[in-house]
Amino acid sequence: MHRFTACGGGFASALFAGSALAHGFGERYELPLPLALFLSASGLVVLVSFVVMALFLRQGTDLRDYPRVDLLRTRLGRALAARPMVLALRLAALFFYLLVIIAGLAGDQRTFKNIAPVMVWAVTWVGFAYAAALIGNLWALVNPLDTLYRWAERLARRPLWLGLRYPPALGQWPAVVLFLAFVWLELVSDSADTPATLAKLNETAT
């Protein structure tokens, strides 16, 4: 009886619930493709992802056991690892990082009229994940925050950590908490598509 009452109460709550945003990008726009093609492609992507997991994520499978190319042993890899190229990549990443901040604070606040949401959610959030899977950890190479920190240390002519050591007891938990906060911002927060909010968060990280 109690279970029936609980189920009935939950059904009634769901029935009379108000509207909710399922994603941070709440603004409507016209799809560039027919709706049927868009939905078919979306469903196919989900299906293929389950097939990939069924084939490769089996018990006892080593996730690192897949064909890889050591870029540092190739001519392209050696060219990318050269100091002038690394400096050029870091400067380009720093330029786009500052561009996101300036565009978010001073640009048009409409989502699809500002470069900040696209750069944060599409290029950085999604693009670097694919790059890490296919090429390698490019973020460690071009991280603009690391570039600014290194420049600040050179200007100060001393380490900025003041001899402080990271507490080993914290482990990787700060990264986990920040990751969950970032995911919450993208999927739940109404401010996820607000250029000014994204610019202020990037400015705070600096």
Image (cartoon, grey):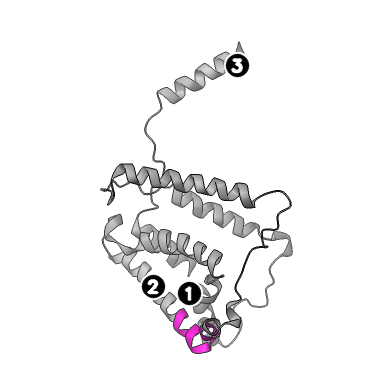
Disc 1, SS: helix
Q: Which residue corresponds to mark 2?
A: 96
Q: Which mark is residue 97?
A: none
Residue 137 picture location, percent across and down: 56, 70
Q: Which residue corresponds to mark 1?
A: 144
Is 82 magenta? The answer is yes
Disc 3, SS: helix
Q: CA distance from mark 2 to mark 1?
A: 9 Å
Residue at the image point whose x is 53% and y is 66% from the top: 134
Residue 82 picture location, percent across and down: 53, 87
Looking at this view, is 163 or 51 the one in front? 51
**Residues at discs 1 and 3 in contact (Cβ within 8 Å):** no
Q: CA distance from mark 1 to mark 3?
A: 55 Å
User: Which is nearer the N-term, disc 1 or disc 3?
Assistant: 3
**Can I make out residue 188 in this image?**
no
**As drawn, is 111 to the left or to the right of 21?**
left
Looking at this view, is 160 or 173 the one in front? 173
Disc 2, SS: helix
| Residue placed furthest toward the top | 1
Name the amino acid type tagged 2: Phe
Is 94 magenta? The answer is no
Is residue 101 depicted above or below 57 in this figure?
below
Magenta part of the chain: 79-90
Name the amino acid type tagged 1: Pro
**Residues at discs 2 and 1 in contact (Cβ within 8 Å):** yes
**Residues at discs 3 and 2 in contact (Cβ within 8 Å):** no
For the stretch drawn in magenta, the main secondary structure is: helix
Q: Which mark is residue 3?
A: 3
Name the amino acid type tagged 3: Arg
